[in-house]
Amino acid sequence: MSTLVIEGGIPLRGRVRVEGNKNAALPLLAACLLTREECVLTNMPRIADVEVMARLLLDLGADVDGIGSTTLRVRCAEVTSDEPDSGLVGRLRGSVLLLGPLLARRGRAHVAPPGGDFPARRTIRTHLEALTAMGARAVGLRPASIYLDEASVTGTETALLAAAAAPGTSEIRHAACEPHVVELCEFLRALGAGISGDGTNTIRVEGGVRLGGATRALHGDYIEAGSWAVVAAITRGHLEIGGARETDIEVVASVLKKMQVRCRYVDGIFHVEEATLSGAGRITTNLWPGFPSDLVSLVTVLATQADGTTLVHDWLYELRLFALEQMSGMGADLFLCDPHRIIVTGPRRLRGKVLDSRDIRSGMALIAAALAADGQSRVQPLETVERGYSRLVERLQELGAKVARV
């Protein structure tokens, strides 16, 4: 287990470029199981979660070249097992995405309970209901008309992966619309599946055709870009963030501007400059194109340095905000109303503290708080945050932060 030691109070300045969308990388890797032909994925994020997914494919019999780089070559000529390594599955919630492709290639899937963030609270019921509707308890996958009881991103992706292999027309209603769902649809289309309606709540899939290979460059990760934007704003620095599309980053920029963050998107670069922050009154997460739950921890930390009161409401997930209670020991003024709402009053001067990174996003939020605090902080385990952020220590150092891995 590693610890990130941080000497706070230094404005971060410079340029940073985000890699491919983590939330697209995992379903695209799972989709490679649907074809016997080679698939090439570029601009892949060099993060621990992608490595775990790649090693799961290896365990199932795939050839995977380029692990640890931004280009992965995957060929699944034969799938030799329907039971992926339970130890790896237990480290990654995205391993649930293997269910559909395994049913397509092997007719059976035996996958241990997936791990990742908050495994006990984030069920896979929606995924299983979609697969059951497509004949998962019978012999072979069949097309189906499915209504998802929630617009779950991974639930939608699970249904898409299964529908691409089921012979005939499937319809997925109350589907998620996030950019990474659209990216999976585009990749499946490149493989040969007929898909329409991506980006809307109703997606139609013409499945069952023999799928070929494809090459895909992933779009930049707007969640990572938003994370760096918060780091810039909370340290009163100036960052130029490249790699994310303007249409993706605007959902982040709208909330930052509400807090008086000086930010603008020019020629492919998202600029965040020093500013005097103001409380936003209320910030509420929502389904796409609303403010993403993945950034709620980071804007909550940012609100500790804003003048006034901000109510942050994440109605999508429980537990994301609990990890931020630690900041009370740093001097933050926080009141946790319930598992979904927290009231933040600022600005408050923060002081260094030993902090526990309980999930990817709250871990990054606590690192942002430590970068703004007086004195030394220690955030551990660092590996939790590195599941979603590539070369984190090196990039912080390149931007002027005084940080070290212990």
Image (cartoon, helix red, strand yellow):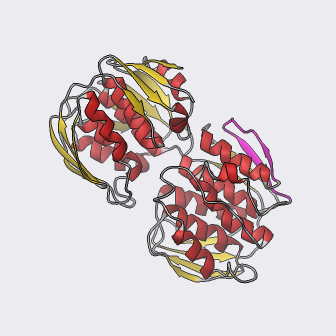
| Up/down of 94 relative to 253, above or below | below
In this view, 318 is above or below 10: below
Relative side of 78 to 175, left or right: right
Quadrant where the N terminus sits is top right
Total marks placed: 0
The image quarter containing residue 212 is bottom right
| Horizontal side of residue 91 vs 285, given as left or right | right
Give residue 69's position: percent from left, percent from top. Answer: 69, 35
On the question of residue 262 being in view, the answer is no
Q: Position of residue 51 (x, y in %)?
A: 67, 42
The residue sitting at 51% across, 32% down in the picture is: 381
Relative to 35, residue 86 above or below: above
Q: Who's the residue at 32% across and 36% down the image?
A: 326
- Range covered by the magenta-colored residues: 62-77
* Residue 394 locus on image (x, y percent): 54, 22
Q: Is residue 340 above or below residue 13?
A: below
For residue 358, say whether it is visible. yes
Please name whichever residue, 202 or 94, is drawn nearer the observer in this view of the structure. 94
Nearer the observer, 398 or 357:
357
- Image quarter of residue 211: bottom right
Q: Is residue 11 magenta?
A: no
Q: Does 74 appear in magenta?
A: yes
Residue sitting at the far left: 308
Residue 124 place in picture, x, y as percent? 54, 66
Position of the C terminus by quadrant: top right
Residue at 83% x, 54% y: name it: 61
